[in-house]
Amino acid sequence: MTVFDVFVRKGFTLARFFLCAAGVMAGSTAIAQQNPPIELKSIDGTMSIVGDLISVDGDVFVVETADLGVLRVQKGSVVCTGSVCPDGHNFGRKFGIYGSRTVGTTLIPNLLRGYAQSIGATFEIVPTEEPAERIVRLTNADGSLRAEIDLQTRGSGSAFPALAGGFAAIGVADRRMKDSDVEKIAAAGIPDLRDTANETVLGVDGIVMITHPDNPVRNLSGEDVARIWSGEVTNWKEFGGGDFPITVNSFGESSGDRAVMMDALVRPTGRDEKSDVTRWSAYQDMVDAVMADRGGIGFVGRWLARTNNVNLLDIREECGLLSPPTDFRMKIEGYALSRRLYAYTTPGSVHPEAQAFLDWTLTSEAQAYIKESHFIDRELERMRLEDMGMMLVHTAAVEPDFDGRQYTSMMQELRGADRLSVSFRFNTGSSVLDVESIRNIEELAARMEAGEFDGLEVLLVGFADSIGERTRNTALAQARAESVRAILAASLKPETSERLVLEPQSYGELLPLSCNDGETGRARNRRVEVWLRLPDSRSNLR
């Protein structure tokens, strides 16, 4: 084996395409040597080889060519054409993307358009008689068909049966797959895809509660929303919004948006939606209804609300913390109704064009198309400590286990620093980072390698929930900050690690993003943040 045996999905080079012009390894799966020739074409269409398929050695084709001799080529890097291509690897040009309306209506088409441009292909979207079904065609510069995508958007729940049935190469969802989804794909022999390489976060969105722009109410608690949805409160004067009857607008029971809102705000109070709400099937219809009704209230994805002049409500948590639907708050997943947008593939052979597209969605180039679709992109934003307002007040005035010396230390260390809109979270009850946090580390490491943070101190700041004794929680948050530092340092070149200061710190229960009275809030509070500051900029407070 040589260095050519390493294959990286993102992009192609000749070294990545042709692995090794060496002899065939013993023990490979033998295939008759008099077979008709096959063509192996790289998924970007720039390289191809023709030869006799000698064997399939695990994830590698072994092919004998007339000019180059015996070559070893990674399965995942090519499309195989020919009568002796292994079953399931002769993908052809067609594949499906099935699932969420939120993800599939605008975001996926825009990302496919950006992907097409990145590879020099043209993009065409063809409507059908069924609004939930469209065909997307990518055409190479020479006029040949590169890919034909069957794009179907019938809701997040439809993604997993489509994966199980082989109709979709990619399933998209505006929520993480649930245990019931795992059961659906298990019948097809597909394992749980959560926390695996087959789970990709495309971006972040949030459900926002919306009212008429003339409604003076600016925030509601989860209890308030639950009382409205259950019919206990029917007039806005209860919340200082004037003497107007409340009109409740909702979606059908299969809606992922409705599930997020109901599960986060209404059902935890033991209530449910009343039967006489006005139901809509189209997002814009919901917005239009609220805009036309002084007493209207509803909920939509923030991607849509930000393009309409509706009033976006903050969520007021029971402990008094406000959760505003801002970009920064959603990027750090600190907003009460924020959600990740997921793409799932099945283990084994993924259609190479589908995989190349998914890999591209994680690049910096793709972020402009995510932002264009009015979703939250992965680009980093900054926030100062003094901008955190109510979080600082809440920490000092409300938290029962408040420690003044620790608070002063935090203010001294972070007052002159910028917080980045990235957080690292761990799987429940473990010191193992979740999949998205691992990707965040990879992206942060790439920025460090590019010199983006040269000359700055990088503070890795751990926080914890307030369950248990304060000093123990502080120590646990410190251990997790040190764990992130070790993983990040291991991801960097030695010379990069030497020129950067990576300092783990911990402030335990301080600066909670959410109330600690529920598991969801506690999970948000258990995180490691990234702060940047100039050397020797620590404040000396008196």
Image (tube, rainbow, N blue to C red):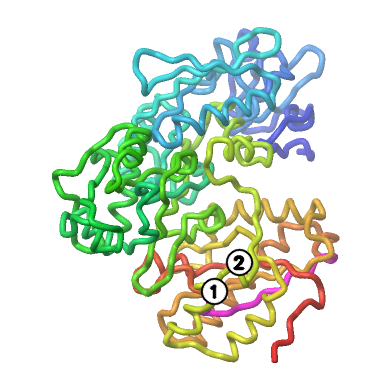
> What's the amino acid at mark 1?
Phe
Q: Position of residue 19 (x, y in %)?
A: 74, 31
Q: Position of residue 403 (x, y in %)?
A: 53, 89
User: Could you tell me which secondary element the residue under label 1 belongs to?
Assistant: strand
For this rendering, which residue is in front, 66 or 524?
Answer: 524
Q: Residue at x 34, y 17 (%)?
A: 130
> What's the amino acid at mark 2?
Glu
Do we see residue 207 in this rendering? no
Please name the residue that numbered disc 1 is placed on: 463
Q: How many marks?
A: 2
Do we see residue 439 in this rendering? yes
Q: Tell whether 444 sits left or right of 536.
A: left
Q: Tell whether 191 sits left or right of 440.
A: left
Check residue 387 for magenta coloring.
no
For this rendering, which residue is in front, 358 or 165?
Answer: 358
> Of callouts 2 and 1, which one flags the residue occurring earlier in the amino acid sequence?
1
Check residue 508 for magenta coloring.
yes
Quarter of the image for the N terminus: give it. Answer: top right
Q: Tell whether 77 sits left or right of 156.
A: right
For this rendering, which residue is in front, 115 or 494?
Answer: 115
Whether the residues at callouts 2 and 1 have beta carbons within 8 Å, the answer is yes
Mark 1: few/some/many CA within 10 Å (<14, 14-19, 20+): many
Q: Magenta segment, which residues?
A: 498-510
The image's mark for residue 529 is 2
User: Could you tell me which secondary element the residue under label 2 belongs to?
Assistant: strand
Task: Measure how far apart labels 2 and 1 are at the Cα level.
Answer: 8 Å
